[in-house]
Image (cartoon, coloured by chain):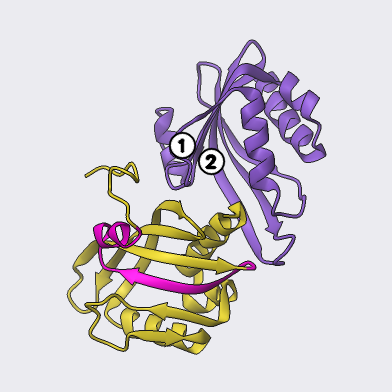
Chain colours: A yellow, B purple
Amino acid sequence: MSRENVEIVRATFEAFNRGGIEAALSYFDPEVEWLGPPEWLEEHLYKGHDGMRRIAGVWGENFDEYRLDLEKLIEVGDELLVLVYQRGRIKGSGDMIEQPIGYEWYVRDGRTVRVQVHFSWEAALEAVGLSEQDAHLES
Amino acid sequence: MSRKNTETLQEGLDAFFRRDRESWLALSDPAFESVPSLDWPEMEPIRGAEAAWDFYIETDEPWERTPYELVDLRDAGAERVVGQMRREMRGKASGATATYSYWVVATFRSGRVLRIEWFSERRDALEAVGLSE
């Protein structure tokens, strides 16, 4: 695992929070695959930069404000497990949400090539055979 | 704020940039500790100046060598300084660019750097030393 990948992922989230998906696209391979979680009711696979724009649009249309705050990066073989909080203000209601999201994140040659999304940290950790204790996370 | 301490911190960064191990070690307390940011893969502090040097070299290896800036320094009392370390990075192999930006709390002992604690957010670094934004 190259430490470069850690900083690439950090930069991706920083760019997204600063300028949305367009600002972050340069960190994604043109053929990137973005896989929704098993319980995701929409299209499961979003491919390429257009796919990234589509998923960002589908998800973002629910929020007036939205950001992804990076909490923990864990090296697992040749991938990174990325644990974040998604925080946003639900459109129309003004209610704020805060939800833990986990990603299995694959970087090759400085670009993200594949992301598998999980709707909880537990599911993400389980997918790579880790527990919260392994990851030194507070319960 | 102790000017000597901030100079020591900057000299350490300059020595690292030059890959001048001897000078960097001379500026670091032998009991030096590097405490990772909570979001890093590293779970435990790296203890000992030589081990920390090796870690910093290894983590920097994928990037083209560019200088670090030390900015927004504040006195945190008790031989401590808080500030931001930043640099523009470009991957040697990938060409990918990223901005390196961390906040550090540096603790000094007898004119040497004893401990560096890393934070991804300014407010967390300030909170660690009892300061606020």
Question: Residue shown at 35%/59% (left/top)?
Answer: A128
Question: Residue shown at 46%/59% (left/top)?
Answer: A80
Q: Is residue A34 above or below residue A10?
A: below
Q: Secondary structure at mark 1?
A: helix
Chain where mark 1 sits: B
The tag on residue B32 is: none
Mark earlier in primary sequence (2, 1): 2
Q: Quadrant of residue B85?
A: top right
Screen quadrant of the N terminus of chain A: bottom right
**Can the viewer see residue B65?**
yes
Q: Is residue B1 magenta?
A: no
* Residue B125, percent from left and from top: 46, 37
Q: Amino acid at mark 1?
A: Ala
Question: Residue shown at 68%/47% (left/top)?
Answer: B60
The tag on residue B103 is: 2
Q: Secondary structure at mark 2?
A: strand
Q: Which residue is mark 1?
A: B125
CA gap, disc 2 to disc 1? Answer: 6 Å
* Residue A113, percent from left and from top: 53, 75
* Residue B3, percent from left and from top: 68, 22
Stretch in magenta:
A109-128
Q: Amino acid at mark 2?
A: Trp
Q: Is residue B6 above or below residue B42?
A: above
**Crowdedness of circle 1 by 10 Å Cα count: few (<14), some, many (20+)?**
many
Q: Is residue B75 above or below residue A139?
A: above
